[in-house]
Amino acid sequence: MKRQNQSFVAEFFLLGFSNFPELQGQLFQVFLVIYLVTLMGNATIIVIISLEQSLHVPMYLFLLNLSVVDVSFSAVIMPEMLVVFSSEKTTITFAGCFVQMYFILLFGGTECFLLGAMAYDRFTAICHPLSYPMIMNKRVFMKLVIYSWVSGIMVTTVQTSWVFSFPFCGPNEINHISCETPAVLELACADTFWFEIYAFTGTVLIVMVPFLLILLSYIRILFAILRMPSTTGRQKAFSTCASHLTSVTLFYGTANMTYLQPKSGYSPETKKLMSLSYSLLTPLLNPLIYSLRNSELKRAVMKLWRRKVDLHTF
């Protein structure tokens, strides 16, 4: 479609998986279930950690923040995506697209920093157990959490404002499931070279650098685990870190493939699947990874349940 230089796009159309109309109904049902399970799982973690005083330690407070990010991430993407699956093309206003992109980048960037902070917390706890209470004190914990959120806000504000400063003069069909930067940028009627340089640099700093630091932390953790005299201690430490590393690899791996090359050679359908991986599967799996195999969270659930039963009894 030929672009008209003097026209202005007031709204966009999200195409989603409209190339497969026969699957729209099944996709709607599948992703509705994923959304509900994601909300329930993360909300459960938020409530348990908030109510149980014994879990008010850095490891679980980081997990609380991660669950808040995951719930928010899903809430930004999933409702609109479900609407997309229920129709061939879904309209989203220019302002609505701006807001969605802003919060996708905000929660995605904040999660990158939080996962890095959680890796540092586990590294300190396993490699320096005696010094852990002094190293990871309340002040350090608060600084890491605030840094994660503030950094996410700063990067997001710059990137989203820059993207929507470009003129959009048609076509206005976003061949994606949401208003993510690479998909929207393809519709800009201007030279985006300098933005792509900025986006590449930002992705390296926000995604690749924390990911490499996490890998280095876990290499150190692995050697520390192997030196543990207790078999039970090794198994517990390895289980916790393996779960964290699984979530990290899934999130960072697919995010890197999407954002390191905004105009990459990946097909639109491949980009959509990669987006689903880090924006939907990670928020779905995090509660399962961190809670089902965590004995302290299970004990906290039972304690809260018994407290509730006792209150009803009296």
Image (cartoon, helix red, strand yellow):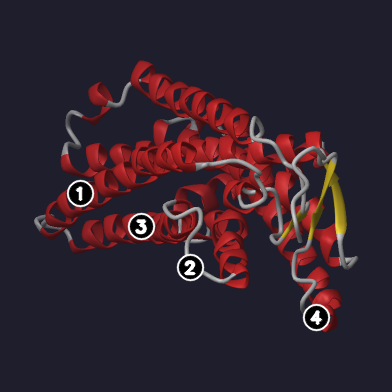
Discs 1/2, front: 2
Taking depth in this image into account, of 134 and 38 the one nearest to the observer is 38
Dot 3: within a 10 Å radius of its alpha carbon, few (fewer than 14), some, or many (20 or more) residues?
Answer: some
Q: Tell me the amino acid under the disc marked 4.
A: Leu
Residue occupying image coordinates x 77% and y 76%: 19
Question: Does the rendering let one see residue 235?
Answer: yes
* Cβ atoms under marks 4 and 2 closer than 8 Å: no
Give the image location of residue 253, x and y in percent.
41, 60
Q: Earlier in the sequence, mark 4 or mark 1?
A: 4
Give the image location of residue 250, x and y in percent.
45, 61
Judge whether 126 appears above or below 15 on screen.
Answer: above
Q: Tell me the amino acid under the disc marked 3.
A: Leu
Marks 4/2: CA distance? 25 Å
Q: Earlier in the sequence, mark 4 or mark 2?
A: 4
Discs 3/4, front: 4
Q: Earlier in the sequence, mark 3 or mark 4?
A: 4
Give the number of the disc on residue 23: 4
* Cβ atoms under marks 2 and 3 closer than 8 Å: no
Residue matched to label 3: 245
Question: Does the rendering let one see residue 48?
Answer: no
Q: Tell me the amino acid under the disc marked 1.
A: Leu
Dot 4: within a 10 Å radius of its alpha carbon, few (fewer than 14), some, or many (20 or more) residues?
Answer: few
Discs 1/3, front: 1
Residue matched to label 2: 265
Taking depth in this image into account, of 104 and 94 the one nearest to the observer is 94
Give the quadrant of the C terminus. top right
Give the image location of residue 10, x and y in percent.
85, 39
Marks 1/2: CA distance? 30 Å
Taking depth in this image into account, of 166 and 250 the one nearest to the observer is 166
Q: Earlier in the sequence, mark 1 or mark 3?
A: 1
Q: Earlier in the sequence, mark 1 or mark 2?
A: 1
Q: Tell me the amino acid under the disc marked 2.
A: Gly
